[in-house]
Image (cartoon, grey):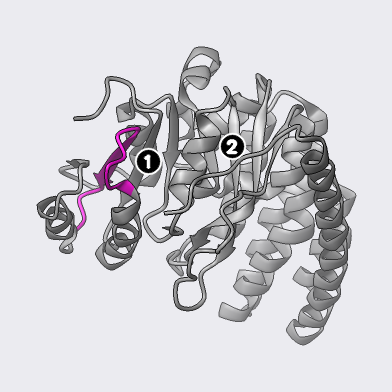
Amino acid sequence: MLPERPLLTIAIPTFHRSACLARLLESLAPQLEGENRIELIISDNASPDDTTAVVKSFQDKGMRLLYTRSEINIGPDANFLKCFRVATGRYVWIFGDDDIILPGSLAKLLNILSQNEYDLVYVGFFTLSGPLATEKSSHQIEAEVIESAREMVKRANHSLTFISGNIINRERVRNEIERPLEELVGTNLLQLGWIFTALNNFRRGIHVTEPLIAAGDSASPDFNFIGVFGPNFVSITDRWLNDPSLRRIIFSSVLKTLMPYFLIRSRRISNALAANRSARAAVSSAFRSNHLYWLYNYPIITLPLKLAEAYWLIVRICNRFDGLLARAEIAMRLAVFRRTDHFKLSVDRE
């Protein structure tokens, strides 16, 4: 029987991806055995496939979970919001159905969450591109306490939009939220409502540098990445994130890393002139006042595709160099933490 108030709610919004959901639940099953601090919720958005049967098969094997199913497809944002409101845990982790929580990760995360009160936990991840990785032999988790919103944003940057990578202090967000989350339904970025609320009222967070998540890539080919991470993202960030300096950090990351990738991806799918003009208009309307748009995005939009791909390669090399410097800085900070015993987390081996 679950306690009245779980420490962590894992809520999985799902739609028409029963195979992905089964893979995720398979990875969770051994980690949930005997664990009473976790509430597991699956919110089915009227899937037309065998999602209900998949969930029942895990319930029949003894997995404790709350399964809810909408009568009609209410859209991804409304389903995210439903998950957030049904959750009862002190922390809530809205987790994508095509991602995987790696073996041993839940014990490590529960150890973190039980030690102190945090507003936001940013969890390291890698992209799933092959067989599921096995658990690392080390039982010590690499993580660092973050005590400023600016440092948290520098660590997570555009990955704040990756819903599976962020665990939210639900109680704090519910008490501090200033705007109705419903206004974000239809943007494909509703999760930024509670993430930005956590940053606006930030006291303390955790950056888990060890990758504990394998991120899938099951996005629909029809998904409008450029529109979502262009006009939608800028509008939400301007309205929901109070500190202009934090907005600048996030916009910089989007323009240097995320948007060049989406632009190249869009052009490879359809290099038609009309599509190219549409992409240019969407990105320009959102970012034309930012000098980084002209340096990182405009050449990729306007150059012939082959030259645009060559330019993108240069951008990636520059970003890789910046990333190496950032990781070196994080490694040095973690080394200091370990030497001073300022923060040490470990879990028992199975």
- Looking at the picture, tell me which residue is in the foreground, 216 or 238: 216
- Kindly identify the residue that appears in the image at 76 percent across and 86 percent down: 306
Query: Which residue, as the protein is rendered here, is positioned at the far bottom?
Result: 306
Tell me the element at label 1. Answer: strand
Asked if 240 appears above or below 38 in the picture, the reply is above
In the image, residue 46 lies in the stretch drawn in magenta: yes
> Residue at 42% of width from left, 42% of height from top?
94
Q: Is residue 46 left or right of residue 8?
A: left
Name the quarter where the C terminus is drawn: bottom left
* Circle 1 residue: 10
Mark 2, residue position: 121
Callout 1: 10 Å neighbours few (<14), some, many (20+)?
many
Whole-percent x, y for residue 8 in the image: 40, 33
Cα–Cα gap, marks 1 and 2: 14 Å
Q: Tell me, for residue 311, which label it has, or none.
A: none
The answer to whether marks 1 and 2 mark residues whose Cβ atoms lie closer than 8 Å is no
Other-residue count near label 2 (Cα within 10 Å), few / some / many at <14 / 14–19 / ≥20:
many
Magenta stretch contains residue 230: no
Quadrant placement of the N terminus? top left
Residue 266 in the image: above or below residue 183: below
Identify which residue is drawn at 43% across, 66% down.
218
Position of 37 relative to 5 (above/below): below
Q: Amino acid at mark 1?
A: Ile
Residue 338 appears at what percent x and percent y? 77, 42
Q: Which residues are magenta?
A: 32-48
Which residue type does callout 2 highlight? Answer: Val
**Of marks 1 and 2, which one's residue comes earlier in the chain?**
1
User: Can residue 93 be seen from the camera position used here?
Assistant: yes
Q: Secondary structure at mark 2?
A: strand
Whether residue 288 is visible to the viewer of this picture, yes or no, is no
Q: Position of residue 286 (x, y in %)?
A: 71, 46
Q: Nearer the viewer, residue 344 or 201?
A: 344
